[in-house]
Amino acid sequence: MSKYFYLIAGLPDIALEDSKIAYTIENFKEEIYPYLSAKDKKLIDLFFLGYDNINVLSLLKDEAASLNERGNFTSEKILHYIAVIKEATQNEDEIKIKDKDFPSYLVQFISDYFLEEKEERKTEVYLEDYLSVLYYDYAQKCKNKFVSAWFEFNLNIKNILIALSGRRNKMDVSSSIIG
């Protein structure tokens, strides 16, 4: 990504006095995407997979749910993969979805979701927490050292905030710590 030195120069000016920033993450993605190489698009997509996590959870609960448009995948694409994974899981077949088409951690999560549904959800782990564990593990395996380190740092900050919040409210949050 070092060849995008002009990217920072092209961003809008932000001053301390600005109370509301008109430049959104969607604007940023829309502006830079056409200029990125396929390899760099994959790196940017890693950050937006968090929105796909929310969308997958929503669609597993309600196929007509409205999605967060920041995600990388359309409703149709997610529903297609959910149907393929559900069928393979129910028939105990091998799931043949390539990571480049749909992230492997989402395939694993959806498969586990249907396996547990079959066994009537015995675990006490929240789906969101389990999906977060899979997501951060997937993102930290990124070959780009900076991106991998950023996800590790972000995970550590979230865990610290969870621990501090639990301590402040005298709650056991050990099951909410990710990773």
Image: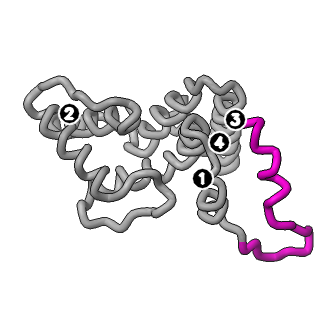
Q: Earlier in the sequence, mark 3 or mark 2?
A: 2
Q: Position of residue 74 (x, y in %)?
A: 36, 57
Q: Earlier in the sequence, mark 1 or mark 4?
A: 1
Q: Toward the viewer: 105 or 41?
A: 41
Q: Toward the viewer: 158 or 76?
A: 76
Q: Amino acid at mark 3?
A: Trp
Q: Quadrant of residue 125?
A: top left
What is the secondary structure assignment of the residue under circle 1? helix
Label 3 to label 2: alpha-carbon separation: 32 Å
Label 2 Cα neighbours within 10 Å, binned few <14 / some 14-19 / many ≥20: some
Q: Amino acid at mark 2?
A: Leu
- Which region shows up in magenta? 1-22
Q: Are marks 1 and 2 in contact (CB under 8 Å)?
A: no
Label 1 to label 3: alpha-carbon separation: 20 Å
The residue drawn where x is 61% and y is 38% is 40
- Residue 150 is marked as 3
Task: Classify the position of the N terminus by image quarter.
Answer: top right
Between marks 3 and 4 in the image, the one whose residue lies nearer the viewer: 3
Q: Earlier in the sequence, mark 1 or mark 2?
A: 1
Q: Amino acid at mark 4?
A: Lys
Horizontally, residue 173 falls left or right of residue 160, namely left
Q: Which residue is mark 4?
A: 158
Q: Amino acid at mark 1?
A: Tyr
Q: Earlier in the sequence, mark 3 or mark 4?
A: 3
Label the magenta part by its dominant secondary structure: loop
Q: Position of residue 30 (x, y in %)?
A: 59, 61
Question: Is there any visible trace of residue 42 in the rendered image?
Answer: yes
Q: Position of residue 96 (x, y in %)?
A: 23, 28
Q: Which residue is mark 2?
A: 115
Furthest residue toward left: 91
